[in-house]
Amino acid sequence: MLTASKRDLFKNNQFVSRKLTSDRLKVIVSRENPLANGTECTIKEIEKQKYITKGEKSSQTKFLSKIFDKAGCTLSDQLIINNQEAIKEAVRKNIGFGIMSEKAVETEFKEGSIKTLEIAGLDLSRDIEYVYIKDTFLTPAAKEFLRIANEIYQDEDFETE
């Protein structure tokens, strides 16, 4: 059995990582939330509210924790819900605020049930990548998935090798 850290595996070129798309996370609030009147909010404003989030094992939670720690932000009043649709429902009911991909709340934003906000001074953009083992055979299904993803995201750098 071989074990190695993620850093070692990428350093030794055992894995290939390719950007699929970029993603922007936004604060989401109900139309009744006091923050809904603006287009952005401050860290101080969100620290006063209940943060509805996924558990600590979520990659998004880990990503945001690093950003908030660096900014000196403490979101101590949290409601953990490990289902994205349930988080949106809790936000719609004005239980607190959440942070989600703007793509994940596009429908709710358009229908007016959720308002999206930027956090002043914080960049909540991230790249979404796919990873596979270098020099491995990709099944026809995997190649088709990558072809469809390329079509959807229309990224010129996207490769299926």
Image (spheres, rainbow, N blue to C red):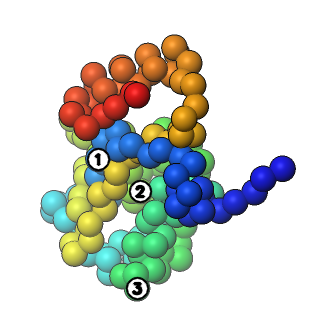
**In front of the other: label 3 or label 2?**
3
Along the line of sight, which residue is nearer the eye, 110 or 63?
63
At a point 22% along the width and 29% down the height, the residue shown is 154
* Residue 72 marker: 3
Residue that mark 1 sits on? 22
At a point 46% along the width and 20% down the height, the residue shown is 143
Q: Dot 2: few (<14), some (14–19), or many (≥20) neighbours within 10 Å?
A: many
Q: Secondary structure at mark 2?
A: strand
Residue 149 horizontal/vertical position (percent): 36, 26
Residue 66 horizontal/vertical position (percent): 46, 72
Residue 149's place in the image compared with 62, above or below, is above
Q: Quadrant of the C terminus?
A: top left
Residue 120 horizontal/vertical position (percent): 21, 72
Amino acid beneath label 1: Ser
Amino acid beneath label 2: Gly
156 vs 147, left or right, is: left
Can residue 105 be seen here? The reply is no
Amino acid beneath label 3: Gly
Can residue 64 be seen here? The reply is yes
Q: Secondary structure at mark 3?
A: loop
Q: Secondary structure at mark 1?
A: strand
Residue that mark 2 sits on? 98
Q: How far apart are labels 1 and 3 at the CA level?
A: 25 Å
Residue 100 horizontal/vertical position (percent): 38, 50
Splitting the image into 4 quarters, where does residue 25 fall?
bottom left
- Assess whether mark 2 and mark 3 are in contact (beta carbons under 8 angstroms): no
Splitting the image into 4 quarters, where does residue 69 fall?
bottom left
At a point 24% along the width and 34% down the height, the residue shown is 155
Splitting the image into 4 quarters, where does residue 37 fall?
bottom left
Is tag 2's residue or tag 1's residue first in the polypeptide sequence? 1
81 vs 123, left or right, is: right
Is tag 1's residue or tag 3's residue first in the polypeptide sequence? 1
